[in-house]
Image (tube, rainbow, N blue to C red):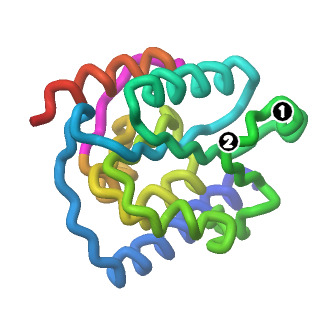
Amino acid sequence: MKKMFNQLRLRSGFARLRQELKKLKRKGHSVSLSEAENIAILIPIKDEKELREVEQFAKTLENENRKVKLLGFLFDKSLKSKLNKSIDLISEEDIKWNYIPDKDKIKGFINKEFDILINLCTDLCFPLVYTAAISKSIFKIAAYDARQAPFFDLMIETKEAGITGFFREIRYYLDKVK
């Protein structure tokens, strides 16, 4: 019964997202990693290991003179005390019944035109997909999922389970973009 209700919630969220996208105007195009100055990273935070991987990923980009903005969806509230202050967070408390995040919580993130937006979710995390889809970012990247294809400019089919492996794949393809 719970699984059916969650599927209903998700279908409602996707329907609402499609309605909102009809109102938005966005000119997306490819941006290479060498051209990007501002990069947004969406991350699911399930455990401390993923958190450290993402922080390392962001530090690598910052060392290359890029501004990095992190937005995480926190699955485990106990991790909140271990988080770096530079990560903006949303959690279960910040989403509506149909998994759509509170707009005030993500307003600053979606209104900024990042050169590249990377969704590091290898599994569906609808609050982050929604945020990426309505973002004004120029080039949006995610792991391949047919349900998310209309919302991203580049999707990479990955066999990597971890964030570090997926980041290596993203970096490989972004270095190829001209």
**Bounds of the magenta segment:** 154-162
Q: Nearer the viewer, residue 106 or 85?
A: 85
Residue 58: where, in percent of width, then height?
Answer: 52, 29
Q: Is residue 147 left or right of residue 123?
A: left
Q: At 45% across and 23% down in the image, what residue appears?
A: 63
Rendered location of residue 155, percent (x, y): 29, 39
Question: Which quadrant is home to the N terminus?
Answer: bottom right
**Residue occupying the far front of the picture:** 65
Q: Quadrant of residue 79?
A: top right
Of residues 140 and 162, the one drawn nearer to the viewer in this rendering = 140
The residue tagged 2 is 86
User: Which residue occupies 57% across, 20% down?
Assistant: 56
Q: Quadrant of residue 66?
A: top left
Residue picked out by circle 1? 79
Task: Please identify the residue farthest to the left as the structure is shown.
Answer: 178
| Label 1 SS | helix
**Residue 161: x %, y % from top left:** 51, 19
Circle nearer the N terminus (1, 2): 1
Dominant secondary-structure state across the stretch colored magenta: loop
User: Is residue 70 rendered to the left or right of residue 20?
Assistant: right
